[in-house]
Image (cartoon, grey):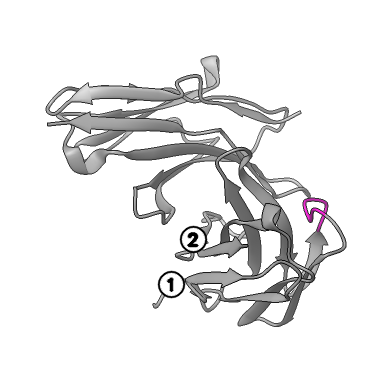
Amino acid sequence: AQKVTQAQTEISVVEKEDVTLDCVYETRDTTYYLFWYKQPPSGELVFLIRRNSFDEQNEISGRYSWNFQKSTSSFNFTITASQVVDSAVYFCALLDAGNNRKLIWGLGTSLAVNP
Amino acid sequence: DAGVIQSPRHEVTEMGQEVTLRCKPISGHNSLFWYRQTMMRGLELLIYFNNNVPIDDSGMPEDRFSAKMPNASFSTLKIQPSEPRDSAVYFCASSRVTGFAPEAFFGQGTRLTVV
């Protein structure tokens, strides 16, 4: 069965702190995709990043970085020097490349960055 | 590209009334998804179309819900009759799920309130 676990329900940090959001996934497929989405207080769901199962390279985009480790089935998201605008709910999701191409979602981590 | 366009953004209706939510996917995307988001249940996939054909409607809560995709550029989600427990934010998303960039892009959502 496929599953995405975001064990951290809520995180609260002070501005400029670094914060890591954890994502652990389960799948039997050898080809799959992992995603992170951001849902700010305004409510829209914003795509942040996709990682393919055959590409374990980590990625950095500005203050955001992602650490994909197949050995631990994890795809963690780190925000460096957090800002108030980073306050949002962050979702991790899994898509298998087989016939069932439904996104499997984590329950989300609510991040509050306080000034 | 204008992104996924949903209408209306907000809908308030009385119990028993018919509600129709509309979605225009991103041009060139071959898959369309309807999601519902509530505090209690999080993000739920209601139905998924591929090339205008419903592939998986197992998430549709009951017969009061129906969805159509008459062409590649338009989809509707209808609730008839509506009930207060249908109050939620309904998201439409589209993607090129069969390609190597299968990430879904979401509309702004429709906030439905049934009183």
Task: State the quadrant of the C terminus of chain B.
Answer: bottom right
Amino acid type of the residue tagged 2 in the rendering:
Phe
Residue nearest the viewer, comparing A26 with B88: B88
Give me the residue at 65% from left, 81% from top.
B72
Chain letter for mark 1, please: B
Q: Which of the two labelled residues, at mark 1 and mark 2, occupies the earlier sequence position?
A: 1
Q: Please tell me which residue is depicted at 55% across the width and 41% down the height of the picture.
A: B39
* Vertical order, A18 against B6 (above or below): above
Do residues under tags 1 and 2 come within 8 Å of each other at their CB atoms?
A: yes
First to last magenta residue range: B57-61
> Secondary structure under badge 2?
strand
Question: Circle 1: is it few (<14), some (14-19), or many (20+) Cα within 10 Å?
Answer: some
Q: Judge left or right: residue B103 versus residue A13.
A: right
- Give the left or right position of residue B27, taking residue B74 as reference: left
Label 1, secondary structure: give it: loop
Specify the principal SS of the magenta part: loop
The residue beneath circle 1 is B3
Q: Is residue A3 above or below residue B105?
A: above
Q: Amino acid at mark 1?
A: Gly
Q: Quadrant of residue B1?
A: bottom left
Residue B92 seen anywhere in this rendered image of the structure = no
Residue B58 colored in magenta in the image: yes
Q: Residue at x 42, y 52 (%)?
A: A47
Nearest the camera: A63 or B59?
Answer: B59
Residue A40, above or below B71: above
Camera-side residue of B103 and A38: A38
Q: What residue did someone put label 2 on?
A: B105
Q: Which residue is at the far top?
A: A72
Magenta stretch: residue A58 in it? no
Apparent side of residue A107 relative to residue B56 in the rendered image (left or right):
left
